[in-house]
Amino acid sequence: MIHLLNLLWDALWSASEMFWEVLWPLILGFALSGAVQAVVSHRSMARLLGNDSPRSLSLATLFGVASSSCSYAAVALARSIFQKGASFTAAMVFELDSTNLVIELGIILIVLMGWSFAAAEFAGGLLIILLIALIFRLTLTPRLIERARRQAARGLAGRMEGHATVDMSLTKGSLRSRILSRRGYTAISHFFVMDWASVWLDVAGGFLIAGAVAAWVPDSFWRAFFLTGNPTWAKIEGPLVGPLVAIVSFVCSVGNVPLAAVLWRGGISFGGVVSFIFADLIALPVLDIYRKYYGGWVALYLLGTFYLAMAATGYVTELLFGAFGIIPSSRTVGAVTAGIRWNYTSVLNLLFLSLAAALVVRFLRTGGPAMLRMMDQPAMDTKTHHGHEPHQHGHAGH
């Protein structure tokens, strides 16, 4: 019994160390993301993404960067804009980018794993767009799109339906005034809290799984599993097994970054890390949502094409970053080994916790809880603008 308790404590402590190391980047990332989302209208997205042209796919990429990092909200919003007239390819490009090119992901990757991984993730994010667009153009048939459209029209619920369909963007005034006004403060606070509510289970799950893996799985297992004794085979295996680990880990969004750090320490290849992080959109819970949204055949199609594109992106980034000599040589992950102590990280955590508290208070004072209750409700065509001070419908700006 004592041994079991020690094992549990080791896992929880490892998870806590990693979470403490990246707490301030998470808060900063979600705050910046909230500011960006506050000036982007969901309805505008659907109107501009009506075909598969380079312009539409470029806009889908930009809208993805400006979106929430929650995998479930991204998948729900992709269906919503598809139903409103966006092309299927543009909707999927938006979905990929909204979980792989968002601000908070880049920040947490830099802090937890280093700038090379953040650079690889963003470079790979652009590459995966090109690969998906090419694969869809060659293999996506009108019949499959029609299957997806008919199933989407049924409106079966997945997760975060309300979060995906409620539009709180500010549409009046200059960009500066929209963000710095009281209405902007309210909108940012709502996006901040709702994004945290969307991903906290995944973030907590990711840290707990990573903590358990770091504490319980010996390095010798990972060295054998990732073929570290043969660097050539390790580079071949990494991008293939990375997405497979993601599929069964059940961790989505930024929650899979801590596990990626543990896998890197264990010996997975650089390209394997990249493909693993991308694969949050083919985790088992997300695949089940694809089945509900678009039907079984389309879900299998997305699994196959996404997996192919993710593995290929892992290989290309490995070759590209290797050619420039910028793949990290050290497997040490500071957040896994540094421990919790009083340093600049602790000071930043306390400062950003104060920012988070201010945003939460604003959220609570402006009708936020009512909006929060809508997040997991069935999808609605709800449009709430902060072009005026919000009132009792959803959020009141005091």
Image (cartoon, helix red, strand yellow):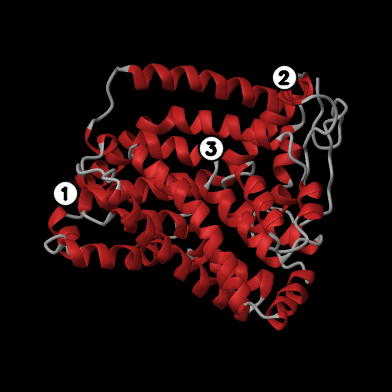
Left or right? Give the position of 378 relative to 229.
Answer: right
Q: SS class of the residue under badge 1?
A: helix
Whichever of callouts 3 and 2 sits on the residue coming sooner in the sequence is 3
Write the residue at 43% across / 31% down: 23
* Amino acid beneath label 1: His
Residue, disc 1: 3
Query: Where in the figure is residue 4, as x and y percent of width and height?
Result: 21, 51
Whichever of callouts 3 and 1 sits on the residue coming sooner in the sequence is 1
Q: Tell me the CA gap for discs 3 and 2.
A: 19 Å
Q: Nearer the viewer, residue 150 or 106?
A: 106
Query: Where in the figure is residue 303, as x and y percent of width and height?
Result: 51, 72
- Discs 1, 2 touching: Cβ within 8 Å: no
Left or right? Give the position of 383 relative to 71.
Answer: right
Which circle marks residue 11 in the picture? none
Q: Tell me the CA gap for discs 1 and 2.
A: 54 Å
Residue, disc 3: 103
Q: Tell me the CA gap for discs 3 and 1.
A: 41 Å
* Amino acid beneath label 2: Leu
Write the residue at 69% across / 49% down: 59
- Against 329, residue 25 (above or below) is above
Which circle marks residue 180 in the picture? 2
The 10 Å Cα crowd at callout 1, few under 14, some 14 to 19, many 20 or more, is: few
Write the residue at 59% across / 49% down: 98
Query: Where in the figure is residue 57, as x and y percent of width and height?
Result: 66, 56
- Against 317, residue 296 (above or below) is below
Write the residue at 83% across / 48% down: 382
For the C terminus, the quadrant is: top right
Whichever of callouts 1 and 2 sits on the residue coming sooner in the sequence is 1
* Amino acid beneath label 3: Ile
